[in-house]
Amino acid sequence: MDVNQLEHLMRNLAIKETRTNSLDVLESKLADVDQDIYEVMLCSEGLFKFLADANSDQHTTASRIIYDKALEFYPNGSVVIDQFIERCLTHPKNTVKQFGLRGAAAMVYHSAAISPNNIQLIILHCLPMKEVYVNTLLNVLVKSLPPIFSEPAVQKNLISVLESDETIRCRVYEIVCTIVEQNPAYLQIADTIIKRALVDLEKDDVLLQTSVLQILTQLLTTKEGYDYVEAHDLFRKVCTNFVPDKVTPYVRFVLPNALKFLASAALIQPGLFLARHPEWVIFIFDMTSPDDPMLMAIAYDCLGMVGSTNEGKVFLNYQKLKMEKFLKEFPGVLHSTLEAYKVRLIECLTNLLSGGNEPIDNMISSITQEWYETMTESKDLEMVHELYKVPFPNIKMAALKLLSAIVDHRWGQLFFQSTAGFNELLLNRRADNDVNVAQFKYDVIKKLSVCTTLESFVANALKQYVSEGAFYRKAVVEVAIEGDQ
């Protein structure tokens, strides 16, 4: 394609009646477009007139044409494509700004550089837009902002966007908290923005409170974030404001995120947090009633998070009466609850009985054995066996994860061996048609095969399964016998 042909196509792109056909022709001849012609195209006034008037489908096609070629010609980024994106981002029409955002995303996702100036323009012109590809916007800024996050101009522009409405402010909070989660050293730099989020949390707006709590939970993935939240007395405020004596319709809306916020704190600093704020865990036990299935599932999620650490297990074990009641009710609740919640309940139990990433000492093993025996009133894994028999892949997978957690304990291995038919069912390759279930079952069997507590004949059968691989199928030989018809 030469310059004259290109200019003809660009003129036709700007005309509504010939736009679609011209776009198709351009895409079909893309292989003939060299770098010089491509750079002429990016500067064409006809192209920008087309972008200003094109519909969504035409933008999608144009995005393929322009940005796929950009990655071919400039895999590491280029001033040429930066200038094109800049021109899009400063265009008066928001649809063209979004087209520029698409280009920035294409470059960032393929590890090609975009200019700091374009990152700033995205903050100023795309972040406050009402209608924007939100996930694309957040992903581009989270990936591209960290190297320049500490620059005063960046902070000034982010803070300026906070003058927008609460939806836009929450975008800023999410970007900043995600970056701080990945780079805790930026906490003090982000202090002004995070404090604005804390102010929003105090407002009498349940939707805003719910969103802000969910975003701030990201800070609790690091000890630095935990210390920051603790220093601002936020744990006490959340417990006081959102964990009430009585669940009202208002509280019920924000309560799930409040509980997950507190549970996340119990994950990162279990001993310290649970010692200072034990009251909300007592509240969670009361929420495990099946009267409100949604809150019940949240309560199980949170108890599982608390009990996933050794310190959390010790804390829960001190709540003797509450824990005993919870465990004895668990099988009945699991049996009667909606299918949508069954996996979450099993995952809660998995966390409670798991050794996690910490060494399993005798105390933890003793606690988990006592809990299991209290729940099932048995010394076998019949409950897990029955769950594994359920023909739904998600339940089977959850049951296998529960089994994997239990057999990390010596008592779990002995209980497994005492469960009639469980070993045979695991070794039955016809029992599982789901690929993910079959692979995870193989991993569990591999773990069991090296357990020294198992009888030799059980261990040998497991080792045979492992040696054959996860997806082995025994060949069936059929012999045709010739005879009278």
Image (cartoon, grey):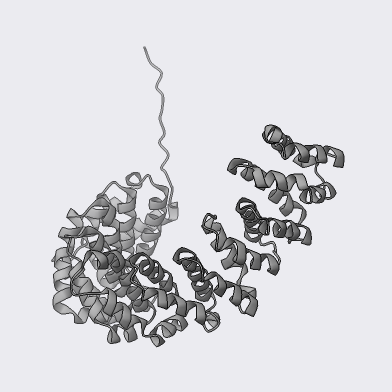
Residue closest to the eye, 81 or 381: 81
Name the image quarter holding residue 323: bottom left
Q: Nearer the viewer, residue 194 or 479?
A: 194
> Can I make out residue 421 in this image?
no
Answer with left or right where residue 428 lies relative to residue 25. left
Q: Is residue 121 above or below residue 433?
A: below
Percent across and percent down for residue 475 are 42, 39
Pinpoint residue 259: horizontal percent, then vertical percent: 30, 71
Vertical placement of residue 452 versus 185, above or below: above
Q: Residue at x 44, y 55 (%)?
A: 467
Q: Horizontal placement of 373 versus 210: left or right? A: left
Mark count: 0
Q: Is residue 169 visible?
A: yes
- Classify residue 341 by image quadrant: bottom left
Pick the front one: 448 or 226? 226
In this orientation, which residue lies closer to the viewer: 32 or 422? Answer: 32
* Residue 113 position in % (x across, y down): 70, 64
Query: Would residue 306 appear left or right of 35 to someone viewing this image?
Result: left
Q: Quadrant of the C terminus?
A: top left
Q: Residue at x 53, y 84 (%)?
A: 188
Q: Quadrant of the N terminus?
A: top right
- Name the spot of residue 247 as percent of width and height, x first: 20, 68
